[in-house]
Image (cartoon, coloured by chain):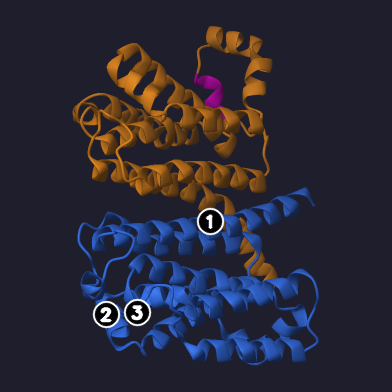
Amino acid sequence: VFALGLAATVAALVGPMDRWADTHLAVHMLQHVIIGDAAIAVLVFALRGPLLVFLLPAPVLVRVARARSFFSLLLRPRVAFALWAANLGIWHVPYLYDLALRHDTVHYLEHACWVAAGLLVWTLLIDPGGHRRLTVGGRIALAAAMFACGQVLTDVLVFGFHPLYPAYPRLTDQKLAGVVMMAEQLLTLGTLAFVLLRPRMRASRLVAA
Amino acid sequence: MSPTDFSWEPAFIVLAVVAAVAYAWSTPPRGWRLASFAAGLFLVAAPLNSPMETIAAHRLLLIHLVQNALIADIAPLLILIGLTPAMKAWLERHGARRIRARWAILAWLVAWYGTHLAGFYNWALDTGWALNIEHAILIAGGLLFWWPLAAGRLEAPAALAYLGAAFVASSFLGLAFIFSSHPFYSFYERAPRLWGFSATRDQNLGGIAMNGEQTFVFLAAIGYYVSRLLTEDER
């Protein structure tokens, strides 16, 4: 599963998808949702339990441990969600989107931000280390909040009658980008919600029976 | 016919009056339940008996789709929210118990997509009287859909799954309108234009209105059940 996540990330950043992303906003959006959401979700899912301890080499782990309070702060649900939502909004501002397209360094920074923000929220949603920072209801609430935020951006892209980004002048392409985002969120967050809610639905049915 | 003229579908005024009398007769509550029920009836009767009906039935698909969204999604929800537990129990004893969530969602989707099929839609608009059938199907579909939730049959997790499935399954119609590059309904191609919209732009805007309304209603409902889930967790 971990290899699948890595392969998806690499496939999104290297090869034809990266070339098409230069000319198609929908493909660029697909690239972003893969590296910042879907692949991250798969990677974090693959690292649940004891595997997590062996992910990083001991010297790196020691350094991470030293910055524990900083990571704990980032992983507070409200902080993580705020950072994720801000990241989503900021990088879709046309000026910054355009800037990232014109300057590789900014583009790399943008992609790094997607990965970092995705790691924060998916760590809370999947809880690979079993820290229980959020209850099941809290995780569903976070997923719903992420979907609602994503929906705002989706609506801006899908409902718009003018292209927002000069590099991508086709309106249908922009609308498709919105649909790509919505579909991907429905797939990842919907799957998570289903997995989290299923035991409760079964329990409710048993009680009713 | 001027867009500001009133058009009527009196059957829905009669239905609203009958529902209001029945509500008043069965010791109605005061406060928010009463307000919700009244608002629901108003949203059934007003869009179908006003200039909105004139524009929807003669000029713009956009207004027709807004009208449909109001009577199919929002009005039934408000009406059911306005019922007291005793009223819901009475309805359960008199047939509503048979409404199963899985069939309710299916019936709602069939009503939603079926009434928007080009053949049916054009027929309803061409004949005029058949609009009553279209609107009755949409209202009935909405009442069926919201009933399992309003009756408290579904626990929060099941309600979230129900709403999520409905949101996804119903969104394709709005998206089809938004992405369309030609009009689906010949009636609106022939109809005199209003406010300078072409038939295609009218359809695109209708899809946006429909999708926007559904997003708002469903996210609000999902938010309510998420908050209930959080409360359950706290316990």
Q: Chain of mark 3?
A: B
Q: In the figure, is residue B143 to the left or right of B191? A: right
The answer to whether residue B31 is above or below residue A15 is below
Residue A23 visible in the snapshot: yes
Residue B7: x and y in percent read 44, 82
Residue B123 found in image quarter: bottom left
Secondary structure at badge 3 equals: loop
The chain coloured blue in the image: B
Q: Which residue is located at x 67 percent, y 86 percent? A: B20
Mark 2 or 1, closer to the camera: 2
Q: Which residue was labeled with disc 2? A: B122
| Range covered by the magenta-colored residues | A50-55
Q: CA distance from mark 2 to mark 1?
A: 28 Å
Kind of residue at badge 1: Phe
Q: CA distance from mark 3 to mark 1?
A: 33 Å
Q: Chain of mark 1?
A: B
Q: Which residue is located at x 53 percent, y 10 percent? A: A60
Q: Which residue was labeled with disc 3? A: B1
Q: Which residue was labeled with disc 1? A: B216
Residue A76 found in image quarter: top right
Q: Chain of mark 2?
A: B
The chain coloured orange in the image: A
Q: CA distance from mark 3 to mark 2?
A: 19 Å
Residue A206: x and y in percent read 65, 68
